[in-house]
Image (cartoon, helix red, strand yellow):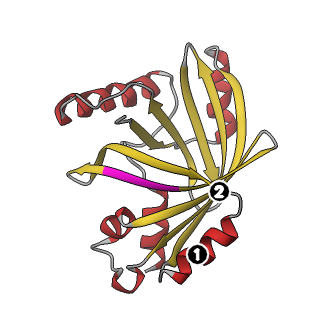
């Protein structure tokens, strides 16, 4: 399955944006804490020009605490890019009992920690559309909108148009957002650290 999503930066306080959605009938359906650790074998080759390439060759160790229930998984995201923007992605997820053991295993295979991204998520829903506020000290406030349809047989142009429609949907809700459509949390934190 080929999925698409957008992640936009919110320019107003989180509580103000939440109130706007609540007034429009959105409901808080879940909250979570996320701790992502990206690992790669290419850290020694990292520079400002190849962050995207390095991330594309990384595995993600993800800890999720969703409404008090813990999930641990190893993920690989195969993101398809066009002009620096994510067109779509395919994910491979493997459940994991111990992320610490997984990290040790990858370290034995010469993987190194690239970046750690910690943030909170508050998901609001209305009519089947879920908007996930992602917020934390290092990332500010973002909204992720994941389209649940399968885009396997769609052209890049059809996907680009759908992502534009998704962006416009958020904008029409009255939430103040930037022009960015594909904010990349890990990429930004890596860029700041170089």
Q: Nearer the viewer, residue 6 or 1?
A: 1
Q: Dot 1 lies on which element?
A: helix
Quarter occupied by residue 179: top left
Residue 113: image location, x then y, percent: 54, 76
Q: Residue at x 71, y 32 (%)?
A: 30
Q: Can you tell which mark lies on residue 89?
A: none
Residue drawn at the location 71% of the way across and 58% of the way down: 97
162 sits left or right of 33 in the view: left
What is the number of callouts on the image? 2
Which type of secondary structure does the marked residue at label 2 adopt?
Answer: loop
Q: Quadrant of residue 43?
A: bottom left
* In this picture, residue 142 sits left or right of residue 54: right
Q: Is residue 181 above or below residue 77?
A: above
Q: Is residue 52 magenta?
A: no
Count neighbours of disc 1 (C-alpha within 10 A) and say few if under 14, some if 14 to 19, many if 20 or more.
few
**For the magenta stretch, what is the residue range?**
75-79
Disc 1 and disc 2: Cα gap in Å?
12 Å
Task: From the viewer's side, name the closer residue of 130 and 76.
Answer: 76
| 78 magenta-colored | yes
Mark sitting earlier along the chain (1/2): 2
Percent x, y of residue 47: 33, 80
Residue 6, percent from left and from top = 41, 39
Residue shown at 42% from the left, 63% from the top: 187
Work out which quarter of the rendered image holds the N terminus and state it. top left
Q: Is residue 193 above or below residue 137?
A: below
Q: Which residue is mark 2?
A: 96
Report if the CB atoms under discs 1 and 2 are less than 8 Å apart.
no
Q: Which residue is mark 1?
A: 105
Q: Is residue 54 above or below residue 33?
A: below
Q: Residues within 10 Å of mark 2 (few under 14, many from 20)?
A: some
Position of residue 45 in the picture relative to residue 124 (left or right)? left
């Amino acid at each position: 399955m080929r999925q698409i999503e957008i992640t936009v930066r919110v320019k107003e306080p989180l509580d103000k944006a939440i109130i706007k959605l609540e007034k429009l009938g959105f409901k808080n359906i879940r909250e979570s804490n996320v701790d992502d650790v990206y690992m790669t074998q290419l850290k020694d080759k990292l520079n400002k020009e190849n962050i995207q390439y390095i991330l594309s060759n990384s595995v993600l160790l993800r800890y999720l605490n969703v409404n008090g229930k813990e999930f641990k998984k190893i993920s690989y995201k195969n993101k398809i890019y066009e002009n620096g923007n994510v067109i779509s992605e395919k994910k491979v997820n493997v459940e994991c009992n111990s992320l610490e053991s997984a990290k040790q295993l990858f370290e034995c295979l010469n993987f190194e920690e690239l970046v750690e991204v910690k943030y909170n998520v508050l998901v609001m829903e209305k009519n089947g559309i879920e908007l996930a506020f992602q917020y934390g000290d290092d990332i500010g406030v973002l909204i992720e909108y994941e389209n649940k349809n399968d885009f396997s047989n769609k052209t890049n142009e059809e996907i680009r148009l759908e992502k534009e429609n998704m962006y416009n949907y958020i904008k029409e809700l009255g939430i103040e957002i930037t022009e960015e459509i594909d904010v990349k949390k890990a990429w930004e934190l890596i860029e700041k650290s170089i």
